[in-house]
Image (tube, coloured by chain):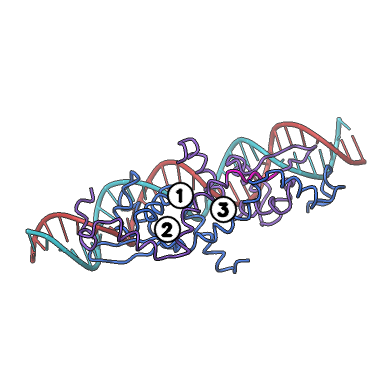
Chain colours: A blue, B purple, C red, D cyan
DNA sequence: AAAACATATCACCAAATGGTTATATGTCAA
DNA sequence: TTGACATATAACCATTTGGTGATATGTTTT
């Protein structure tokens, strides 16, 4: 169970990877390694400030780190925070190896009397 | 490499799981199985229409399916679409077992002449 | 020093997001 | 039927998001 502060950071990570442009940036960093900012924007049709903002989101989520070398800002992947996402997803792995597990569990965990009827008290 | 149509669906999935309330709904479905809509909203402080909207997002992402039984709409998890997310994340697993791989790859894949200098042509 | 380059940030805008209060629809209970 | 219940949808609103052009900052080149 993640601590509350981890919770907050975790949110930023989920938000960060929700955008395709940012996923593309991460993918690029993963395959080609440390790269200057401008190079990371080549994939998608967008202005330099837009790219810069995406990079900020990724920075705030802890998914990338920067190192300055002359006038270049070299970005590198920090996949660490993705681990939490991976762990969350892992909880669902069992569902796509046998989808009917969900039903089995349902029948197990729910009181049979309630099953087809109205919940005794919803509030 | 996902087909373009898969791509579009994939976006909806990433967006859907970006919201903590929706993740909570999925978690609830995973642990307690098929449940009526109202029950899924118990976790978070929010109105019924808000819940209904979240459920719609999840439906559109293909992450849940509904079955009507009397006046109840019974929601069940469909974790299938999460698989794509899991596969995407898997590409990053190697980075958190040995974080320096990224640097090694960088030195490999980039032209050494370019390394510390300005990229010959960014555009 | 001046010009070019790489990047971030500012000010602004349109669209999307998430929430709210009605309200509509369908089902069960009296 | 009439009323309560479960859910969705409509209409609306505030906030967030992602994009843009302008500009500031720092670095390298000339």
Q: Which image quadrant is residue D2 in?
A: top right
| Element carrying mark 1 | loop
Q: Which one is in front, B57 or B3?
A: B3
Q: Residues within 10 Å of mark 2 (few under 14, many from 20)?
A: some
Label at residue A57 = 2
Q: Look at mark 3 in the image and give the residue it sits on.
A: B19
The residue depicted at 67 percent of the width and 50 percent of the height is B47
Label at residue B67 = none
Q: For the residues tagged 2 and 3, is the chain the same?
A: no
Q: Position of residue B20 (x, y in %)?
A: 59, 56
Q: Position of residue B22 (x, y in %)?
A: 61, 51
Q: Chain of mark 3?
A: B
Q: Magenta segment, principal secondary structure?
A: loop
- Answer above or below: position of B88 versus B106: above
Q: Position of residue B11 (x, y in %)?
A: 50, 44
Q: Which image quadrant is residue A45 in?
A: top left
The alpha-carbon separation of the residues under discs 3 and 1 comes to 13 Å
Label at residue A19 = 1
Which of the two discs, 1 and 2, labels the residue nearer the N terminus?
1
The alpha-carbon separation of the residues under discs 2 and 3 comes to 16 Å
| Element carrying mark 2 | helix
- Answer above or below: position of D1 versus C22: above
The residue depicted at 57 percent of the width and 47 percent of the height is B82
Q: Which image quadrant is residue B99 in?
A: bottom left
Q: For the residues tagged 3 and 1, is the chain the same?
A: no
Residue range in magenta is B76-81
| Left or right side of B79 for B3 | left
Q: Chain of mark 1?
A: A
Instruction: Evaluate if marks 1 and 2 touch, with contact meaning CB atoms under 8 Å apart.
Output: yes
């Amino acid at each position: 169970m993640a601590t509350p502060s981890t919770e907050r950071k975790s949110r930023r990570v989920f938000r960060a990877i929700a955008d395709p442009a940012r996923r593309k940036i991460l993918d690029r960093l993963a395959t080609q390694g440390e790269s200057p900012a401008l190079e990371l924007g080549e994939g998608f049709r967008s202005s330099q400030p837009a790219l810069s903002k995406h990079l900020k989101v990724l920075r705030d989520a802890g998914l990338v780190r920067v190192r300055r070398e002359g006038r270049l800002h070299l970005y590198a992947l920090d996949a660490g925070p993705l681990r939490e996402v991976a762990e969350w997803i892992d909880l669902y792995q069992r569902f796509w190896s046998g989808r009917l597990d969900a039903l089995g569990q349902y029948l197990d965990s729910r009181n049979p009397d309630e099953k087809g009827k109205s919940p005794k008290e919803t509030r």
